[in-house]
Amino acid sequence: MDFVIDNIIIPLIKIGIVFGVLSGVVALMTLAERKVAAFIQVRLGPMRVGPHGILQPLADGVKLMLKEDILPAKADRWIFTLAPIIALVPAFIVFAVIPFGSTFNLFGKTIALRITDLNIGLLYVLSISSIGILGIILGGWASNSKYPLMGALRSAAQMVSYEVALGFSIMGVLMISGSLSLVEIVNKQKEFGWWFVFLQPLGFILFFVCGIAETNRAPFDLPEAESELVAGFHTEYSGFRFSLYFLAEYANMIAVSAMAVTLFFGGWLRPFPNVALPGFLGLLDAPLMGPVWFAIKVAIFLYCYLWFRWTWPRYRYDQLMKIGWQWLLPLAIANLVATAAIVLLFVRKG
Amino acid sequence: MAQAETLFDASELTVSMGPQHPSTHGVLQVKLKLDGERVLDAECVIGYLHRGVEKLGEVQTYGQFVPTLDRMDYIAAVSNCLGYCETIEKLLGVTAPPRAQYIRLIMTELNRITSHLLWLGTHAIDLGAITTFLYCFREREEILKIFENYCGARLTTHMFRIGGTQYELYEGFQDQVRTFIQDFPKKVDEYETLLTENRIWLDRTKNVGIISAKDAIDLGLTGPSLRGSGVQWDLRKAKPYCVYSEFDFDIPVGEVGDTYDRYLVRMEEMRQSARIVSQAIDKIPDGPLMAKMSKIIKPPVGDIYHSIESPKGELGYYIVSDGSTMAYRARVRPPSFVNLQSLKKMVAGHMVADVVAVIGTLDIVLGEIDR
Amino acid sequence: MKVKRRDLSLIKRLFLVDLIRGLKLTFGYQRPSANYTEQYPKERPKIAERFRGAPRLNNDPVTGETLCIACNLCALACPEHCIEVGWERDPAGKKVLTTYTFDVSRCMFCGLCEDACPTPCLELTQEFEMSLYGRRDMKLDRKTLEEGVQPVIYLK
């Protein structure tokens, strides 16, 4: 009985909570994007559906589901339907290894605030995020049309190039923490008393820039921009399938933000994690505050995503690829070499 | 559309950036010959918005033709009106009274600001800076409110009549214009903060769409596109019309002739227009609004060409009169039509994404090109 | 005057100065309380007094008779030939207006008819909500013009 509760029921509950919260956040992001864009642009955004537009995601969802389901002639029906799912699922399963908090006790059971703790967590995340690219290529291919195919290939090429720089940029964190497990990385940050962003500032900037390029957001969103000749891989999609791609983009954004927070900003730790707080402020150290700190940090990152999109123009495709290969990759490798030198000389010696 | 046997075996692909496209600023079709991502050649197909304006000039009387001309360059309608009224006045030999000329000048310069704001908004949004569009339209709204208060319409204004202006200035006009002009340079600074030194903008617009001064003059380019290439030619200073000679303003000129230069020229022109308006608004003389002339306009037999500096370039009118109340021929020299010819030269060798930037920088209005 | 071409120095490039300045500007704008939004169609938009909207024939406020003297100047002034004036002579020899049609579907709201009218009879009002269901309804007759286009009832 204990075995069943420990290994089946509790994980199922955790999965349910994480999945539910994630879906809710993704839906809320669609509204947040419009509201933040509106506030930056001196207007109000959705105001009609519900007070201050709160129910807008619901209306959008209903609309997209009721739209006519268009399938292009000669398009490969199964792959056409499967592609958005392949793009969406990896973004969700990344959250299986991300720690939301430490552990706490409930009815005598120690419950860890994470779904699981893989000791190759970082590797898992990198490999899963590469699967999402497949969803885009298949979407463009299955549309059986020239322009979506070209758009899909460009988008995929962009994502693959920035994956390389992304991988290199987090090597520094790996070296300092000495472990691939995300839980270990956060615990090491607690041990050091400093978030890794202070030890690896360049690594963080590179990671975030590559993350923006990975998710095809401005200023790297040429493959899906409207004013381009090639309208992008989701030209032929409409209705529910289009909404899946749409949600996949937001879920990817949340995944990248969560990774940035976990690797560089201390995950569920509060600022100055080793400084003891007096009196009732000690509540801020409670185990259940872990997810709250995590949520605040992820929200700030998501806001930055929106902020960047609505402020800056976008890069041309060849400039985009040039930045990925000629600037970010060498900088990431330089960061790696420098970190390795410092770790070898100063840390291991002592 | 592809003239290749297999999908990827295209050594030369002809793609039509068709009449329905978010960035061609109207119904313009650009047939591009591509080699991969590089543009080899571009051919423009126009005529999708032809409405027979010049023919209407032959069946409407001179006074009735003025509102039809508003629909030509619908963004800078006041300039169209000014050019035509001045042409007919020259043909008739009358001059508008000074008060009317000052009002005309103020409204035309405000219209220049409006047109450049719309250009900036659409150019920025084509290149991805979406917020600039909304900021420009906020400023534009202020000017359009002034226009609405003055003549009753925001876009197709029909402000002037042959011989002067019809409408008297409304109560509060000077205050409204002064408030706007005082705030405006700060707003232009905001657009510059967002774009002028932004590395992404510099990468997208520097050395894109270069045209040399000699090529520009050979192709008949006029307006800010010509001044971006380094040629100091502005009809307001070269052949002053209206009362421009009484005001103090500079003509911004570029050096290289790329998109970035044209952008800088137009931003500076907005500031200079604000400068002209701030000088003029204090000096409006009193007097009548219409010159003394007969109600029925019957010019003597003859022809005349007169041009003004509209926000897009040199807008010219060639009127042939046969002595009756309707023109024998009313020909318009639209600046965008002549400027569009340089698209081929500007775009050759660039990428597809740059075609969008170049069309934006030429500042074309299809209503004017097709008439 | 020559325009100043900008170039980013190395320091500016390294520290992302230009990008951060843009971000600061857009961040500073986020005050929804400072916006003014006209909630059309719930509230009536502000229209200028001289707005050239739907046409209207005015009657004398005291006697209730039409002010139109059937001079036909508006029909002659119109570039689109939208107006048709019907008149007859009364026993005293004065012109009296019988029918008056105004084709709103062809009108471009230029205001030349309003300028031409010697009396305060023809005016272009501030009504712009003139949607109708068919083209024949757009040829407004004298009765509709004298009543004026009915305004929509606003909540505010």
Image: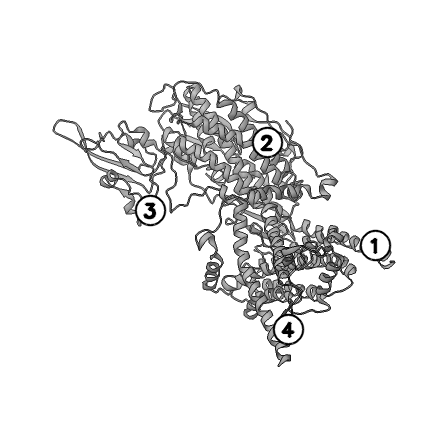
For mark 4, what is the residue? A109
* Both marks 2 and 3 on one chain: no
Q: Is residue A310 above or below residue A183?
A: above
Residue B268 disc label: 2
Q: Nearer the viewer, mark 4 or mark 3?
A: 4
Mark 1 secondary-structure assignment: helix
Q: Amino acid at mark 2?
A: Glu
Q: What separation in Å lies between label 2 and label 3 (alpha carbons)?
A: 43 Å
For mark 1, what is the residue? A342
- In which quarter of the view is residue A174 placed? bottom right
Quadrant placement of the C terminus of chain A: bottom right
Can residue B28 be seen here?
Answer: yes
The chain to which mark 3 is attached is C
Residue C131 disc label: 3
The chain to which mark 4 is attached is A
For this orientation, the residue located farthest to the bottom is: A1
Q: How many residues crowd mark 4 within 10 Å: few (<14), some (14–19), many (20+)?
A: few
Q: What separation in Å lies between label 1 and label 2 (alpha carbons)?
A: 51 Å
Q: Nearer the viewer, mark 2 or mark 4?
A: 4
Mark 3 secondary-structure assignment: loop
Q: What separation in Å lies between label 1 and label 4 (alpha carbons)?
A: 42 Å
For this orientation, the residue located farthest to the front is: A279
Q: Is residue A33 above or below residue B338?
A: below
Q: What separation in Å lies between label 2 and label 4 (alpha carbons)?
A: 71 Å
> What residue sits 58% from the left and 39% below the top?
B361
Q: Amino acid at mark 3?
A: Ser
Q: What separation in Å lies between label 4 and label 3 (alpha carbons)?
A: 70 Å
> What residue sits 45% from the left and 31% below the top?
B78
Q: What separation in Å lies between label 3 and label 1 (alpha carbons)?
A: 75 Å
Q: Position of residue C31 (x, y in %)?
A: 53, 43
Mark 2 secondary-structure assignment: helix
